[in-house]
Amino acid sequence: MSWKPNRSSHLTMQEQIIDWVKSRIDKGEWTVGTKLPPQRSLASQFNVNRSTVQLALDELKASGLLHTRAGSGVFVANNSWNILLNNNQPNWHRHIESGIHKPNYHTIQLINEYEQQEGIIRLGTGELSPDLLPTEQIKDSLSEIQLESRAIGYSSPLGNEKLRNVLCTYLKKRDIHTEPDNILIVSGALQALQLISFGLLEQGSVVFQEEPSYLNSIHPFQSSGMRVTSITKELKLKEILKEQKRNRQSLYYAVPTLHNPTGRNWTLEEKERLYDVCKELQIPIIEDDVYHELLFEETYPAMKSFDTSGQVLYLGSVSKTLSPGLRIGWVVAPTPVIHHLADIKMQTDYGSSAFSQEIVAHWISSGMYEEHVSKLRARLKERAAFTEAILEEQFKDTATWEKSEGGFYIWLRFNEPVVNKALFLNLINRKVLINPGYIYMPSDLHHIRLSYAYASLKDLKEALGILKELIS
Amino acid sequence: MSWKPNRSSHLTMQEQIIDWVKSRIDKGEWTVGTKLPPQRSLASQFNVNRSTVQLALDELKASGLLHTRAGSGVFVANNSWNILLNNNQPNWHRHIESGIHKPNYHTIQLINEYEQQEGIIRLGTGELSPDLLPTEQIKDSLSEIQLESRAIGYSSPLGNEKLRNVLCTYLKKRDIHTEPDNILIVSGALQALQLISFGLLEQGSVVFQEEPSYLNSIHPFQSSGMRVTSITKELKLKEILKEQKRNRQSLYYAVPTLHNPTGRNWTLEEKERLYDVCKELQIPIIEDDVYHELLFEETYPAMKSFDTSGQVLYLGSVSKTLSPGLRIGWVVAPTPVIHHLADIKMQTDYGSSAFSQEIVAHWISSGMYEEHVSKLRARLKERAAFTEAILEEQFKDTATWEKSEGGFYIWLRFNEPVVNKALFLNLINRKVLINPGYIYMPSDLHHIRLSYAYASLKDLKEALGILKELIS
């Protein structure tokens, strides 16, 4: 349980809070430089008035244990009393700074942080709203899961065999014909990118992408020392790829169906051209296909469906359709690649949750999955239409967008370059959280990735009203 | 479903198998250099005689599509027909070779591979036997899990809040007093090592360990470019650490309770001395405490219980006690460290399975976990005694060992240096899989990590008989 002051103690609330903060510093839980939670969170945790917290912190500041950095919060101070007390603490700050894996960008850290807060409207979240998740049905289905002792031990390197078999059948509907030993189960598509980055590229390799790109908002490749290069796929594709690649290892990251963040679909010609050029230049392609089940109308063929050279690494997942909490995705690739990635996965986390794998196998094989996805598509389509109607009403003069063909997003383009960090922060102050275009393309100050999948319709309307107000 | 020949086809079994192999090569699923599964696996998959498979493969070899490498198996050949067909396949072999993350050692790959095979007796496996897992109780408990829609969305960076609260209470029994924001939920302790390696060390940092060490059989630190240095903890600890560390980042990896692979417990003095020296030299300590619940008798205090400077990163897990398939562990560390590791975890896999986290929270908070662990301890103690009785009867003259104090292992030492790769392979031929000492300490040819936790008592007896026969 989180600590709370004891109301029947002989000490005042304020004194107890002071003692608690001191003990956390004393035990080394809050090291020098640690940022304290905001006063309002502490007040809510302690169930006291904010002024009580403030008085306690003031006293700690006066004694030199804490200090305030203007605009950024209250920190554990580096003063002599403190250093004396915590003689020889490891220099965690230096450790954190020197780690190979870099922290997320500040805007993204803020997004992660504010997404957890109550009362904020999430206008950009790439996640289904809680009321779109089949929580009750999943709960009911747990009693139907066949759990075997073998299955809840350590997983085989490629993942649950039943699930891989089920996926072979399922993927046939996407016109992908494969075998269980060409499938690796992963903990979501992001982990697949991480494994590919560590397993198939050397430092300094080139990762090609379109721009804007989801890859710019995460950095599985950048963190392991790859060069990520944005190219336009329209003109002189072959020449550009050839020139940029030179003799280095490389691969192309593509989201040809319901692209993140733009929501666009590549034409068949675009896919074939990229495939042919990459084949000629021996550049493997990652086809990130996690949104395809959410296409409102016709299905566009996956590049993997016409891959005869084994150069497409195909990624799927249930995070956008069934539940992100399951953490289940898959890679389809040539056998030697799959075995190598599986070997690295075993070294990383010894496989994905056996329970999650059983749940997904059950949902797909019983047909519950497709039935659910079909209903989900209809509801997302309604949400898209609702949102587009508001845009039509309120943003026709200031912005442009394309009608959504499926998935979660509308790539809203403002005529003026107004989508900067100040707007992002001002919206947070008004309890609205957006995904600004610049996290997908650093130079972009025109776009917002609007998600109609998460917020309630009421919240969507309210937040768009606030957005309009701040823009003008 | 895995492919099988069609018994009512107008083609013979053999012809169908040939066509299937050709189509897999044709589609790029089996690229040049891919090793085919063993004939016995194919025969079992196809439900045909092994001779049918052999005839089919012979024909494919004669046509130049496959070739045999003596002693290592059948491979997709690099011949002109094939190259013509798969014009410009990516050079996967080069990609795999150049990856940052290296493959596991060969012996360990073989262990991973043979562990999956039916009929093999696993004499070294660090895993509970299926009949020691509370599979039925877990299944029954699923109906009691409170699933909320929020909980099955993307996780908060530190992990399920309920579970972190439950762990705070649970850890008090280990005399570790902490708060939810000092706990990060991870997908098993191995992932914690990976996150620490990427998050808190720069390339070339020094990771100290005892030898033999579990770390030598996995390589989360080596793979990201750290220098792993084994030191004896007895003599001149401070001088050695100081000299080896110099100005580099460093940390010390310790398993002070039921050490893996030796099963030994550090004395309190050893722990205090290491803690004091590391504190003086500002070297953080990883305390891997995943076996402590399995101590047969008294509980030894964790280093974390007397850590007042926040320099101990404490690791726990349910993989050795409840189910490895859950993939749930935790790190206890100072707040800034936890937040940094959480940020990297979000970049790696967006959190651990929400379902697994709910199950663990339910088991620990309801008391079912401790009740189960208490029974488990008793059963492991019986297994240890049974195994020690066999050793006493059969190995008294050729080997020595210490009576197990808990956990899974007996660190069996042969008087002669007989535990080499040949013994490992000969035992595999007799369907017995061991974990030889050399995977924990390369120069060691004396030890076997004997696990009494996995094989049935009958199998244990039989396999020890075979071991005795091959040794003499």
Image (cartoon, coloured by chain):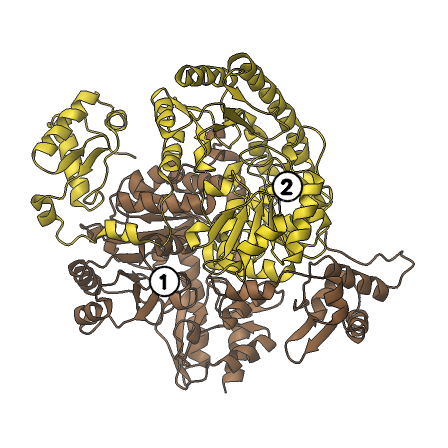
Chain colours: A yellow, B brown
**Residue B26: quadrant of the picture:** bottom right
Say which chain tag 2 marks: A
2 or 1: mark nearer the eye: 2
Camera-side residue of B126 and A173: A173
Q: Is residue B102 visible?
A: yes
Please provide percent x and percent y for residue A263: 58, 32
Residue under numbered circle 1: B406
Give the crowd class for mark 1: few <14, some 14-19, many >=20 residues within 10 Å: many
The image shows a total of numbered marks equal to: 2
Measure the alpha-carbon separation of dots 2 and 1.
38 Å
Q: Which amino acid, by three-letter code, is at mark 1?
A: Gly
What numbered label is drawn on residue A270?
none
Q: Is residue A277 above or below residue B218?
A: above
Which residue extends farthest top? A393
Residue under numbered circle 2: A362
Give the crowd class for mark 2: few <14, some 14-19, many >=20 residues within 10 Å: many
Asked if the residue under mark 1 is in contact with the one under mark 2, i.e. CB atoms within 8 Å, the reply is no
Which residue extends farthest right? B10
| Local secondary structure at mark 2 | helix
Left or right: residue A202 versus residue B36 is left
Please provide percent x and percent y for residue B326: 48, 48
Say which chain tag 1 marks: B
Left or right: residue B329 versus residue B27 is left
Please provide percent x and percent y for residue B138: 51, 44
Please name the residue shown 51% across and 16% down the image.
Answer: A395
Q: Which amino acid, by three-letter code, is at mark 2?
A: His
Left or right: residue B381 versus residue A355 is left
Q: In this view, does A248 lie above or below A125?
A: below
Please name the residue shown 33% across and 53% down the image.
Answer: A99
